[in-house]
Image: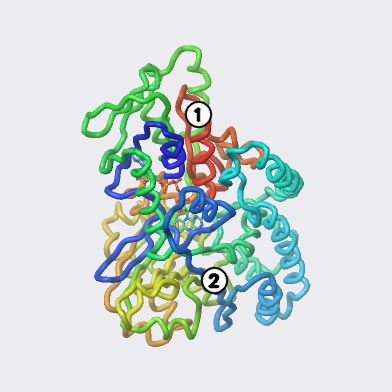
Amino acid sequence: MTAALSLADKGKEVLLIEKNEQCGGLMNSFERDGFRFEAGARGLVNAGLVQPLIKEFALDIEILPNPISLGIEDKMLKVDGENSLSLYADVLKDLYPESTDEVDRIIQAIREIIEDMKVLYGVDNPLFAKEKRNILTMAPSVLAWMLKFVRTMYRITRMSIPFEDHLDALAANQSLKDIIGQHFFRGTPAFFALSYFALYDDYIYPKGGVGAFIDKMVEAVGVRGGEIRYGTEIVYVDARNKTLKDSAGSEYRYNKMIWTGDLKALYTMTNDESIEVRALDKFRTTKQAILAHKGAESVLSVFLAADLAPAFFRERTSGHVFYTPDRRGLGTVHTTELQALLQRWDTVHKEDLYAWLDRFCHYNTFEISIPALRDPDAAPPGKTGIIISTLFDYELTSRIRAKGWYEEFKMRVEELFIKTVASGLYPDLGDKVLFSFSSTPWSIHEWVGSSEGSIVGWSFEGEIPVVTSMLNMGSSVQTALPDIYAAGKWVYSPAGGPTAIMTGRMAAKRCQ
Ligand SMILES: Cc1cc2nc3c(=O)[nH]c(=O)nc-3n(C[C@H](O)[C@H](O)[C@H](O)COP(=O)(O)OP(=O)(O)OC[C@H]3O[C@@H](n4cnc5c(N)ncnc54)[C@H](O)[C@@H]3O)c2cc1C
């Protein structure tokens, strides 16, 4: 969307091809019986990108606050500025009185990262500043930003080790470490994981939902003469003749193409014959590296409508919550225990799976989103829609499907998720559920064609086959294919909404 809008704005002839009937991919909203939900990101991380983008393209959208609450057992903290970090430390010390020094060390590490984040995200990214068209006005702000940026980059590079290793160096209490980190993707670089506390204050919510932001972008592409073709899945790329083919057999010619789907799909649907001989070696090596690696963990989400007014929930939390029902944390439930379950899968009974699932839910951390607490129009009067989710393994989901347990498993998950938040956070909720449904890593794989249902691109476990240094982010949009650039969550790691926007802009620049 960012790439299409940026190019249409430059007067380029733009065709955006989308396999679904709506744009936005993992940024979307949908309605069910009068309740509005987000199937992807529950809010937007501004990251010095979203607000400038809205300003630059004059998108007519109201931005609402998106305060975050952090809850562990019965302790709830509403994040509001930097002081919240001290309050968070107090909560942790209350929960783990035997580990106060460890808490101090972890909080100090987070505090240092927040200082770095102010450089990265606190200043509007100059890529999206209107003044950039005038090089004289642009230069000082870019220079100032770059100087701070490079200094910050040095520190970030030093903290690119997995967050688990970083926490091991700071603390020994496994439960404490779990509570800090179990809602991150395994192996997430320490800087990215620990910076999340700073991001809590950076979330925003568009009036009308995340999808409303996308709708405005779609509108803006159209106003600038860009064309969007929905329900059209690209299945073949001929890089030599600069032609794409969709699943219905229609062909499209391009001068320059920006691929924003899964890179595995791009390299799979491009074969040697469509590559010029001089580019063949690079193409083959890149393809091999891309196909050898897998996506990060995906998400399991339960959507429910409650016959309770938003005020009931507002008394307890804000509209976006990270909640852990038990201070003991997941331990090895989602790592070695899960691996053991997968290894003996042929002999696993449904009861074994559900026993594991019970523990997985009891000790896990959940992201809870209540759209109506941010935008009252998100639910019918006196009622509230809620999304409860947690990271989940794609491989396990596939095996559950293969055994024919999928639908029953989803019902079980809905019951368990609702029971977990009802018993700890929202008493009364259990009896007031009007309807519920769920989505799994498989749903995400189906919806956007993401390998392993990944929502943030590559797994952090093992070698990552794309650019991982922010200093080289500009080159992340290059591919091994002539006149084909790439953007989105697969081209740079770590990724998420901001990376998709940033690389979309960078790829567009290469096409101007
Ligand atoms: C539950 C959830 C919570 C999240 N929370 C956050 C968060 O808090 N912060 C954050 O930064 N990020 C978050 N994310 C991740 C973020 O939403 C994504 O990383 C980001 O939106 C990815 O954007 P993208 O454009 O790279 O890819 P996608 O959103 O996957 O878009 C790719 C698009 O390409 C289309 N496509 C794919 N293949 C083809 C094809 N062959 N032909 C035609 N069209 C095709 C897809 O249909 C899709 O529309 C979350 C995601 C989820 C699911």
As drawn, is 113 to the left or to the right of 428? right
Q: Who's the residue at 54% across and 71% down the image?
A: 68
Q: Which of marks 2 and 1 is nearer the N terminus?
A: 2
How far apart are the two marked residues, 2 and 1, measured between alpha carbons? 38 Å
Crowd rating for badge 1 (residues with CA inside 10 Å; few <14, some 14–19, many 20+): many
Q: Name the residue under label 2.
A: 68
Q: Where is residue 1 in the image (x, y as percent from the top left)?
A: 42, 45
Q: Which residue is drawn at 58% across and 43% down?
A: 127
- In the depicted structure, whether residue 103 falls above or below residue 442: below
- Residue on which the image places disc 1: 479
Q: Which amino acid does label 1 sit on?
A: Thr
- Nearest to the observer: residue 328 or residue 253: 253
Q: Where residue 96 appears, x then y in whole percent? A: 68, 78
Q: For this view, does 104 lie left or right of residue 195?
A: right
Q: How crowded is mark 2: few (under 14 residues within 10 Å), some or many (20 or more)?
A: many
What secondary structure is marked by label 2?
strand
Where is residue 262 shown, x and y percent of the image? 42, 40
Residue at 54% x, 55% y: name it. 185
